[in-house]
Amino acid sequence: MARALSTATLSLGLVAIPVGLHATRRRSGKVSYHLVHAKDGSRVKRQYVCEEEGTPVPDDELARSYQSDDGEEVVMEADEARAIAPKATGRIDLMEFVPTGTVDAIYFDNAYFLAPGKGGARAYHLFAATLRELGVVGVGTQLARGKSYLVAIRATELGMTMHTLHHADEVHAEQDVPHGDATRITAAERDLARTLVEQLRRPSFDPSRFEDEAEVALKKAIAEHAPTPKKSKAAPASAGGKAPKVVDLMASLRASLEASAGGKRAAKRGTKSATANKAPKRTASAAKYKRPTAAKPARAHTARSTTGTPRQRRSSRSDATP
């Protein structure tokens, strides 16, 4: 459990027992919500608006209005009202002890586990054992958070709990509630009612047998409205549902190295063989498809005369041309 919400001293005359107050109510796991703007989902904040002016009032301008017995409105500044409130003493002052069954559960408000403070374990357990043996509850007051609380200290199996109680003027009298006329009940009706109760009777109260149906329905609705998360593709299951084969890493590496070395040797031999076989084929092919070259006729050269006149030389060249 987390650390204590607060600390106090359980005071009984000259006896002072340091204790820590721990919450009994567990809030984790319960669904909570925030008010948002339905249009865009943005959170909203509350403001105090002046009814007369219709504008928001800042915190430093807020005051408290109380109603007197005559029905008159009495306005006080917040600081003035806080100054009137009783100061916290840090004590739980026990004033009397009453039988456990005489404190009606209708007066119970909040409950806190009491744990022994530093150096107070011995006195704590002594006092708890005394309350348990005598079957009594300690009743007193505690000044905290600007209020005066009426409290009851009750012994439990392991230690003690503190219950804050409603004051008498905070609880309606049962006589103020209409109960109707008590009609005559027959013996047969009583027997039938007893049989029904006995069928549902349990040796003790166990809250775990009861489910918070509203919480369950709300969680279900939230799950249905929530966007579906994208699921990652699962690896395909092995055929037949068999367990995967355990691989010897060293053996696999050796086999891979041997296969690689053998492949290189085979590739090298194949390259040499291909080189030896391909060279003659290229020569034979070239010889087979090579076209024979015909001998070119020798070009007749006409001796150029260097004698005679130019006109005679041109005439002689024309006569010699085929």
Image (cartoon, rainbow, N blue to C red):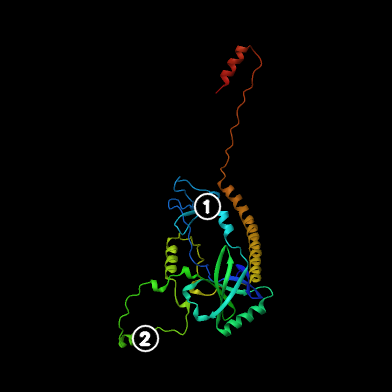
* Quadrant holding the N terminus: bottom right
Depth check, front residue: 167 or 126: 167
- At 47% from the left and 83% from the top, the residue drawn is 204
* Percent position of residue 3, x then y: 62, 69
- The circle drawn on residue 63 is 1
Dot 2 or dot 1: first in sequence order is: 1
Amino acid type at mark 1: Ala
Q: Secondary structure at mark 2?
A: helix
Instruction: Using residue 170 as the reference point, say whether residue 260 is left or right of it.
Output: right
Residue 272 locus on image (x, y percent) = 65, 58
Which numbered disc, 2 or 1, marks the residue closer to the eye? 1
Q: Position of residue 299 (x, y in %)?
A: 60, 29
Q: Nearer the viewer, residue 248 or 89?
A: 89
The correct choice, above or below, for 219 with respect to 103 in the image is above
Residue type, label 2: Arg
Mark 1, Cα crowd under 10 Å, few <14 / some 14-19 / many 20+, is few
Identify the image quadrant of the C terminus. Answer: top right
Distance Cα–Cα, label 2 vs label 1: 58 Å
Check residue 238 in the rendering and tell me which mark sits there, or answer none. none
Would you say residue 319 is visible in this rendering? Answer: yes
Image coordinates of residue 254 in percent, x first then y, are 66, 69
Which of the two residues, 244 or 171, is positioned nearer the viewer here?
171
